[in-house]
C-alpha cells in the first residue's frame, strides 16, 4: 500500500505538477501575448493613420503583423511546453508547400492583391471598369475586390482576374470629355445647326469653358450631316452634364423644326419608248 502511495506521489510530483505548470504558463503566455499583440497592432494602426496611408495598405500591414506575431507566440508556447520548435518549423514548411500547390489560384489572387495595393491603379471609392464590370470600389481585400455597380449590385472579383485585365479608372483625371453626336437631315443648314447647338451647349450647368465646347461636322452619310458635340466637365459632374447635353440636343432639334433624318432612295425610270423602224418610201 505504501509503495502505491509512493508511486502516486511520484506521478504527481514528477509528471502532473510540471505538466500542469507548463499548461498554466502556456495559457498565461497566450492571454498576455494576445493582449500585447492587440495593443501593438492598435498603436501601429494609429501611427499609419496619422501618416494618412491608404486604408487597404494599412489593413494589409496590420494583418501581416498579427499573423507573424501569432506564429512567434505559438512557437514560444511550444518551447515552454517542451515541444522542439525545429520539427514544428519543418512541419510548417511542409504544410506551406502542400497548401501552395493546392491553393495556387488563391495565392495568385493574394499576390495580385499585394500588387494592387503597391501599384495603386485604383483605390476605395474610385469608379472603374475592369473584368467586364463597371462600378465604385467599396473594398480591396487580400484575395478579392468588392465593387458596387450602377444598378446597386455587389460584385466580388478575384484580384488576379482584376489585375490581369484592362483597368479604366474614371476618377484619376479632374475633368472628362463628353462625346455625343447629332444627326441632321440634308435639308438643314449645317452652319446654322452648329451655331444653335454651340450656343445651347455652352449654357449647360457645370460645362467647362476651357477647353471650350465644340460642335463640328464629323461626316456626311446617307441620312444627312452628322455633327459631333464635344465638351468637358468636372469628373464628379460628368453624368449630369452628359444627360443635360442629350436633352439640349433634342430640344434644339425640336425648337428649330428640323425634319427627322431619313434615307432617301432616288429611282430613275427610263420612259423612252422604243423606236420602230419605218419602211423606206
Image: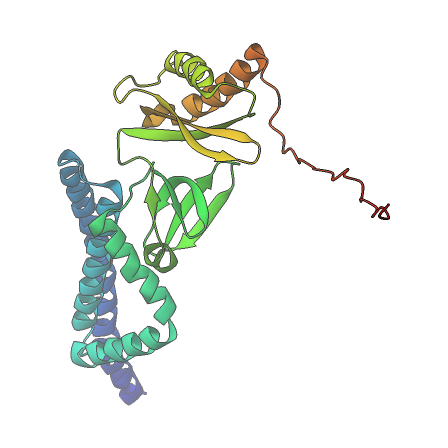
Q: Is 187 or 144 nearer to us in this picture? A: 187
Q: Position of residue 156 (x, y in %)?
A: 44, 50
Residue visible at 50% across and 20% down?
Answer: 249
Q: Is 10 or 187 nearer to us in this picture? A: 187
Q: Position of residue 225 (x, y in %)?
A: 50, 29
Q: Is 135 or 142 nearer to us in this picture? A: 135
Residue visible at 60% across and 27% down?
Answer: 261
The answer to whether residue 173 is left or right of residue 274 is left
Q: Is residue 269 above or below residue 211?
A: below
Q: Is residue 129 above or below residue 143?
A: above
Residue visible at 40% across and 12% down?
Answer: 199
Residue visible at 29% across and 81% down?
Answer: 8
Q: Position of residue 281 (x, y in %)?
A: 86, 45
Q: Position of residue 91 (x, y in %)?
A: 26, 79
Q: Is 183 or 204 nearer to us in this picture? A: 183
Residue 229: quarter of image: top left
Is any part of residue 153 visible from this angle? Answer: yes
Q: Is residue 93 above or below residue 204?
A: below
The answer to whether residue 56 is left or right of residue 196 is left
Amino acid at each position: 500500500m505504501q509503495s502505491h502511495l509512493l508511486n502516486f506521489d511520484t506521478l504527481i510530483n514528477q509528471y502532473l505538477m510540471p505538466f500542469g505548470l507548463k499548461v498554466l504558463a502556456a495559457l498565461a503566455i497566450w492571454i498576455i501575448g494576445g493582449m500585447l499583440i492587440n495593443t501593438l497592432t492598435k498603436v501601429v494602426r494609429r501611427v499609419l493613420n496619422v501618416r494618412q496611408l491608404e486604408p487597404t495598405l494599412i489593413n494589409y500591414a496590420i494583418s501581416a503583423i498579427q499573423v507573424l506575431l501569432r506564429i512567434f507566440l505559438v512557437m514560444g508556447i511550444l518551447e515552454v511546453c517542451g515541444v522542439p520548435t525545429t520539427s514544428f518549423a519543418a512541419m510548417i514548411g511542409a504544410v506551406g508547400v502542400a497548401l501552395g500547390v493546392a491553393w495556387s489560384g488563391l495565392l495568385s489572387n493574394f499576390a495580385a492583391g499585394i500588387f494592387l495595393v503597391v501599384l495603386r491603379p485604383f483605390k476605395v471609392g474610385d469608379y472603374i471598369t475592369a473584368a467586364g464590370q463597371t462600378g465604385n470600389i467599396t473594398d480591396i481585400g487580400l484575395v478579392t475586390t468588392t465593387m458596387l455597380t450602377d444598378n446597386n449590385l455587389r460584385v466580388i472579383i478575384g484580384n488576379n482576374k482584376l489585375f490581369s485585365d484592362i483597368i479604366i479608372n474614371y476618377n484619376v483625371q479632374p475633368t472628362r470629355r463628353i462625346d455625343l453626336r447629332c444627326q441632321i437631315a440634308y435639308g438643314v443648314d449645317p452652319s446654322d445647326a452648329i451655331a444653335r447647338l454651340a450656343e445651347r451647349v455652352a449654357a449647360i450647368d457645370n460645362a467647362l469653358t476651357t477647353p471650350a465646347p465644340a460642335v463640328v461636322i464629323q461626316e456626311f452619310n446617307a441620312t444627312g450631316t452628322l455633327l459631333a458635340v464635344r465638351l468637358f466637365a468636372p469628373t464628379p459632374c460628368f453624368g449630369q452634364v452628359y444627360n443635360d447635353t442629350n436633352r439640349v440636343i433634342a430640344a434644339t432639334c425640336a425648337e428649330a423644326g428640323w425634319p427627322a433624318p431619313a434615307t432617301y432612295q432616288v429611282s430613275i425610270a427610263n420612259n423612252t419608248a422604243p423606236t420602230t423602224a419605218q419602211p423606206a418610201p
